[in-house]
Amino acid sequence: MADKQKKRERYANDTEFREHLKDYERTRYRKQKAVHVRDCSSKLGKLNDFGEKRTVIDDGKRKTILTFSTEEVAEAIEYHPTRVRQWQGAGKFPKPALQVEGSKLCVYTLKQARMIVATMARHQEVNQYLRDDHTETIALLHRAMHL
């Protein structure tokens, strides 16, 4: 009984020990349950496979460039498009701002998509979901829109 109490106290007071146990338990759970762990880092080099060339109006100029819809970005970061749209509605994920000519569709540029995928790849190393308290990741995702 004394050992359990000591372990509880160490868990409560030792941040490094607590994080080590959390990582261990998380890994053990994923192995036992065969949980799919998202890792979109391999998609960075293959982004061209997800996007599509579209004609857009950018800074008053008509351009045909490689762009990415919300669905295409969602596929690249290994989440369902509905989840990404929910995040957009909650302000956790940036909405695309570039409108396709002759359409209501708004898209991301290649630079924006690349930064979004890179940010989510780093995020997925530690977290499988995007929560409200992941403020650093959310800020980086929104910063992608200013490229």
Image (cartoon, rainbow, N blue to C red):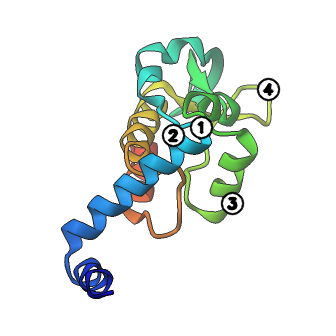
Q: Measure how far apart labels 2 and 3 are at the Cα level.
A: 33 Å
Q: Nearer the viewer, residue 65 or 38?
A: 38
Q: Does dot 1 land on a helix, a strand or a loop? A: loop
Q: Position of residue 115 (x, y in %)?
A: 40, 36
Q: Residue tagged by mark 3?
A: 89
Mark 2: secondary structure:
helix
- Looking at the rendered structure, which numbered label has been put on residue 31? 2
Relative depth, front residue between 86 and 110: 86
Give the amino acid at mark 1: Ala
Residue 99, horizontal then vertical, whole percent? 67, 35
* Alpha carbon separation for disc pair 2 and 4: 48 Å
Tag in front: 4 or 3: 3
Horizontally, residue 3 falls left or right of residue 52, namely left
C-alpha span from label 1 to label 3: 31 Å
Q: Tell me if label 2 and label 3 are in contact, CB under 8 Å.
A: no
Instruction: Identify the residue under disc 1.
Output: 34
Q: Would you say 84 lies left or right of 121 here? A: right
- Classify 10 Å Cα crowding around label 4: few (below 14), some (14-19), many (20 and above): few
Graded by Cα atoms within 10 Å as few (under 14), some (14 to 19) or many (20 or more), the crowding at tag 2 reads: few
Please give the name of the residue rendered at 31% of the width and 82% of the height, measured from the top-left corner. Answer: 8
At horizontal 22% and vertical 80% (from top left) the residue drawn is: 10
